Image (tube, grey):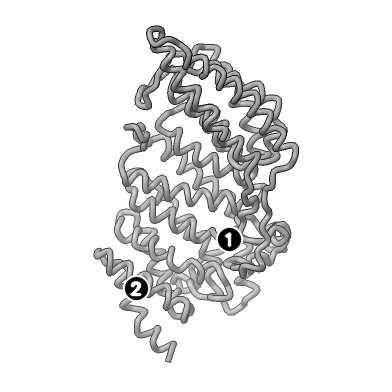
Amino acid sequence: MKKYFVELLCTPTLMAIFSKDGDTAARARGTLRNLAYLEADIVMPPFLERAYNGLEAINETHRTTAVLHALSEVVLPLVSEDIWFGGQKHILPLLELCLPGIDLNDPGKTVATASFVSNVLQTVPIMSLVGKSDTSGDLMPSLVDSTGDLSVGALEDRDAERTMVIESTGLFEDWVRAFFERCLVLYKTLPEEGGRSKKTGGKQEEAMLSGLREATEVICTQLSDDIFNSVLNRVYDFASTNTKLNSMKAFCQLLRRVARSRPSQTLEKFIPLCVRQIKLELELGAASIPTTSTTDIVHSDTALLWHLSLLQAVMADAGEAILTYRTTLLDLLPFLVEKIKSERSYSLTGSIIKTTFYGLTTVYCLNRQSLNPDEWRRASNDRASHRKWGKFYEGHDVKVQWHVPTSKEVDFALELLQCLTIPTLEIVESLIQTPASSRDKIWRNDFVSLPIIPRMDC
């Protein structure tokens, strides 16, 4: 009965997902998801045939977007061999085909692409399993059978099917590089920030950037150490060769996700760069013009703002890794408080201080991967770890590693509090005592900027 029910609804559902009526298409996608859970062997092969055709037809935007939205609904049958044995080998080809969907000129398709990427990789560790098996032949097996038709069903030989999955993971590193490259190209071509909220473009651009943030969050969390180092080097190259205000916010959000994944490696790369360039820019007179308006942009401050933003991003949830740079930060932060005068610069300085205090003194989760820490460590050396793709835990089985402030972190936070807050408050007290007749533009700037420092400490 169940099989007949699914066969009856399969074809009209597959037609309805391409409807131009949004409500009809959304209901069809929900139906497709439920049917795939009931009888994946019946639903997934014909759906994947349409999915490949839709992703290859790059000129048919509506069809491509519809396929990406539908794929986001059936990711669990794709990634879990317990639900459908035969879906895992399609993950890399589908990810490759969706890369052109990251397009600044088509925010809707970009949002759909980011949604599919984040959903499908949420329970898939991004690591190569090729070196852990005795496989041979081409890295990517053909998805076309001997008759020339697309092979989208499970192979009869389960070992051969699993070998195809293992070999396909060898393409993860190239795909991740290509994904980040497309994101960086998109960031370069973003419109300039505008208004008091400093938003990039309109609502569509903001939705697109929000989708990419979610996708990069998932990818950075799921990366193996080898692939992470490749990503970190590319991100560092971009950060050290660009200083564009239009891409600053979006890129720093990406960098924040990279840093949260591996704080020690990221700080080791970025702290020397940021400190060196910030001091150089301040010596050259950056941020020396007093401003209190969020919309006043001094273009000579661009490089300083860029590196301040980088520093703020890499300090996110860094925990004990911050202690390695204790002396550096105790030297830099008071110097920033003393020298900067422009609104955006002292606001960013306040954010750096706040992020540093948060990383040192707050309790937060350290492991965000899809597997428990012990299983994650074994997965990179286990050729059969792909069988755990799509795995979900019961609440009592989840092993969470928490960041709990150590005595050294608390001592450093108190030292920062002592050297930043007390001198700043003393200056504010003296400003209050200044006669009204002597309160000029410089007084107003100091009175607006300096209270940000103790407020960010709290």
Q: Is residue 49 left or right of residue 315?
A: left
**Which numbered disc flags the more N-terminal residue, 1 or 2?**
2
In terms of depth relative to the viewer, which is nearer, 311 or 245?
311
**Circle 1: residue type:** Val
The residue nearer to you, when weighing 406 against 400, is 406
Residue at left offset 61%, top offset 42%: 317
Using the rendered view, name the quadrant where residue 437 is placed.
top left
Numbered tag placed on residue 253 in the rendering: none
Residue 335: where, in percent of width, then height?
59, 18
**Looking at this rendering, what residue extends furthest in the bottom direction?**
1
Residue of label 2: 14
- Report crowding for label 2: few under 14, some 14 to 19, many 20 or more residues within 10 A (C-alpha): many
Name the image quarter holding the N terminus.
bottom left
**Foreground of the two, 223 or 197:** 197
Whole-percent x, y for residue 427 in the image: 54, 17
- Three-letter amino acid code of the residue under disc 2: Leu
Instruction: Kindly identify which residue carries mark 1.
Output: 124
Q: Residue at x 59, y 68 (%)?
A: 392
- Estimate the spatial distance between the alpha carbons at disc 1 and disc 2, rounded to whole Å: 26 Å
